[in-house]
Image: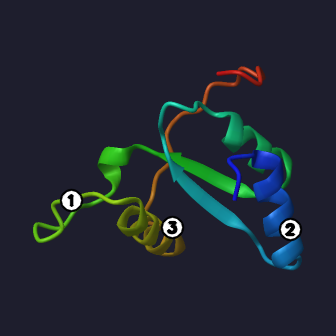
Amino acid sequence: MPGSPERLIKYLKSNYPKANLRTVYEAGFSGFVLHRELTEAGIDNIIVNSSSIAVESKDRVKTDKRDATKMAKHLSLGLLKGIYQPQNKSKVD
């Protein structure tokens, strides 16, 4: 899927029309544009610090797939705390 908030929102809304959508992603270089787009579309989203994703001693290598699985599980259990998001409405963070 292309890296486009609009495409992601369209995909989620069309494939899960009656779902109570909750999303999470790691803070990174891309700023908060995705967060703002998701929340404006009515999707509950939080951003977490990458260091808050627990890494087990046997899993010393972080991968996107492992991190995504852990974040989804921790989100469903209510174990994640989001970081502060500035209120700047600029489309370019």
Q: Is residue 74 left or right of residue 16?
A: left
Residue 4 in the image: state x and y as whole percent.
Answer: 74, 46
Name the amino acid type tagged 3. Leu
Q: Residue at x 65, y 53 (%)?
A: 45
Dividing the picture into quadrants, the one containing residue 54 is: bottom left
Residue 39 marker: none
Foreground of the two, 21 or 77: 21
Where is mark 2, residue-wise? Answer: 13
Please identify the quadrant where the N terminus is shown: bottom right
Dividing the picture into quadrants, the one containing residue 23 is: bottom right
| Up/down of 41 relative to 17, above or below | above
Name the amino acid type tagged 2. Lys
Q: Is disc 3 in contact with disc 1, using a CB cutoff of under 8 Å?
A: no
| Up/down of 9 relative to 91, above or below | below
Q: Residues under labels 3 and 1: Cα distance? A: 21 Å
Where is mark 1, residue-wise? Answer: 61
Q: Earlier in the sequence, mark 1 or mark 2?
A: 2
Q: Earlier in the sequence, mark 3 or mark 1?
A: 1
Q: Residues under labels 2 and 3: Cα distance? A: 19 Å
Between disc 1 and disc 2, the foreground one is 1
Number of marks in the image? 3
Residue 58 in the image: state x and y as whole percent.
Answer: 11, 71
Disc 1 secondary structure class: loop
Residue 12 in the image: state x and y as whole percent.
Answer: 79, 67
Please identify the quadrant where the C terminus is shown: top right
Q: Residue at x 43, y 69 (%)?
A: 74
Disc 2 secondary structure class: helix
Pointer 1 local density, CA inside 10 Å: few below 14, some 14–19, many at least 20:
few
